[in-house]
Image (cartoon, coloured by chain):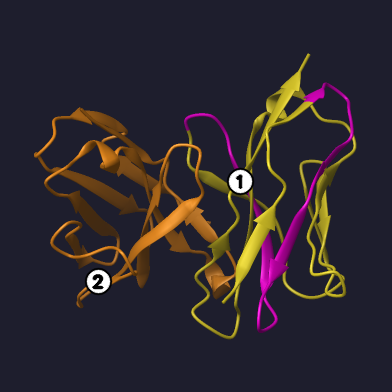
Chain colours: A yellow, B orange
Amino acid sequence: GDSVTQMEGPVTLSEEAFLTINCTYTATGYPSLFWYVQYPGEGLQLLLKATKADDKGSNKGFEATYRKETTSFHLEKGSVQVSDSAVYFCALSDQGGSYIPTFGRGTSLIVHP
Amino acid sequence: SAVISQKPSRDICQRGTSLTIQCQVDSQVTMMFWYRQQPGQSLTLIATANQGSEATYESGFVIDKFPISRPNLTFSTLTVSNMSPEDSSIYLCSVFGQGQHEQYFGPGTRLTVT
């Protein structure tokens, strides 16, 4: 079945550092890929998405590119802020099936001033 | 986008009791989803609730433990029955966005069972 693998956290960075959170996936079809963010005490929010190969999703300075050849969707940000501290979930949705997403385990990001 | 509210936002309950969680959406939706997020873990889908039909439960979840109601296109409830400490989790309600490319989530209900 479909699966998503994320790098384990926590990832601890200083403010203005470069961020990469790795995500790889396994899917039988042609999934859509997502990054969700969960701030402390809140539900999940969609951060960005890409629906086909080579698409780049971007939002709030975060980017991720849908790489079919490496089955990856790594999340990057050039300069993190303390307010980016949260848990980040990579997810895929099989557009030819139920559309219900499969989530990774989540990666906690802690940004220090 | 959809705006989703949940009640209660948190609760502390005693073993053996039941808690009903409400989910309200600001627009009509066909499917509503209930997830469980155990401490430090990812999301696990409990069930899909369609208006006018029985909820569809995922493997490992049963109706007797997690009864769900879906009386109309904007509202659903999830009951956690006969609770044990292992039920301590965040319970999240969600719906699809337009085109079913993404999901929107409620703020969650943080349940602690003592």
A3 left or right, relative to A60: left
Which structural element holds mark 2? loop
* Badge 2: chain ID: B
Q: Which residue is mark 1?
A: A106
Quadrant of res B53: bottom left
Q: Is residue B28 visible?
A: no
Please check the rendered image and state whether residue A18 is part of the magenta-colored stretch, yes or no. Answer: yes
In which quadrant will I find the N terminus of chain A?
bottom right
Residue A62: % across, % down = 80, 45
Identity of the amino acid at label 1? Gly
Q: Classify residue A54 by image quadrant.
A: bottom right
Residue B69, image quadrant:
bottom left
Q: Is residue B54 left or right of residue A30?
A: left
Judged from the image, the secondary structure of the residue bearing numbered disc 1 is loop
* Badge 2 density bin: few <14, some 14–19, many ≥20, Cα 10 Å: many
The magenta-colored residue range is A13-41
The residue closer to the viewer here, B65 or B24, is B65
Q: Amino acid at mark 2?
A: Ala
Answer above or below: position of A69 versus A43: below
Residue B106 pos. (x, y %): 42, 46
> Residue at the spot x=17%, y=57% of the render?
B65
Quadrant of the snapshot with the C terminus of chain A: top right
- Where B48 sits versus A30, above or below? above
Identify the mark at residue B55; answer none if there is no mark: 2
The reply to whether residue B4 is in sight is yes
Residue at 30% in and 31% down: B10
